[in-house]
Image (cartoon, grey):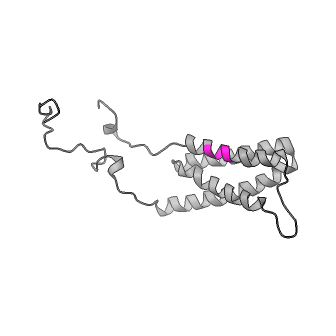
């Protein structure tokens, strides 16, 4: 019986509404880890993000205006390309995490006094711009969508 006291139409009494896979809502599905291939892809994207971060740290200081744009463009291409290649937002988060780890490690000064990032405007633009690009690419990446005809209303 529904709230207005009438039975549902179509003989749906006592039957649970299931999703396309027959397992219910996506929110009711158990969480499972990524497959081995997907885990290897995430690890590869993490390492590639670390390489792009280190290269960007060198390039942005060498050729200031053009190098900064090249470094941020390369990072954006990797983040968005990772999201598109894997098909989820985690494809953008994995290289962004690798980028962040390498850039943070490169900002620390050594006991000898050596450092890679100077306290200039270019370094700060690279750090903050890279973080902003990572957030934008992670939010632009497509989330997992259910497939099948049962997910469309009225079908």
| Image spot of residue 38 (x, y percent) | 51, 58
| Image spot of residue 99 (x, y percent) | 68, 55
Point 34% across, 53% down: residue: 29
Q: Nearer the viewer, residue 125 or 38?
A: 125
Quadrant that contains the C terminus: top left
Q: From what the image shows, is residue 31 above or below residue 148?
A: below
Which image quarter: residue 122?
Answer: top right
Report whether 2 appears left or right of 130. left
Q: Nearer the viewer, residue 2 or 77?
A: 2
Which image quarter: residue 140?
Answer: top right
Report whether 18 appears left or right of 58. left
Report if residue 74 lies within the magenta region.
no
What secondary structure do most residues of the magenta stretch adopt?
helix
Point 23% across, 42% down: residue: 17
- Does residue 73 appear in the picture of this structure? yes
| Image spot of residue 141 (x, y percent) | 55, 43
Point 59% across, 55% down: residue: 94
Image: magenta residue range: 131-135
Quadrant that contains the N terminus: top left
């Amino acid at each position: 019986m529904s709230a207005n006291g009438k039975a549902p139409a179509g003989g749906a009494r006592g039957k649970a509404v299931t999703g396309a896979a027959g397992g219910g809502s996506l929110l009711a599905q158990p969480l499972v880890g990524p497959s081995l291939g997907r885990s290897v892809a995430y690890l590869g994207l993490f390492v590639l993000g670390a390489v792009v971060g280190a290269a960007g740290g060198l390039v942005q200081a060498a050729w200031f205006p053009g190098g900064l744009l090249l470094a941020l463009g390369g990072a954006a291409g990797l983040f968005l390309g990772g999201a598109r290649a894997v098909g989820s937002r985690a494809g953008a988060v994995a290289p962004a995490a690798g980028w962040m780890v390498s850039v943070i490690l490169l900002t620390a000064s050594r006991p000898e006094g050596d450092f890679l990032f100077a306290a200039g405007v270019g370094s700060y633009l690279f750090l903050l711009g890279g973080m902003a690009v990572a957030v934008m690419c992670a939010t632009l990446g497509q989330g997992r969508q259910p497939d099948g005809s049962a997910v469309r209303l009225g079908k």
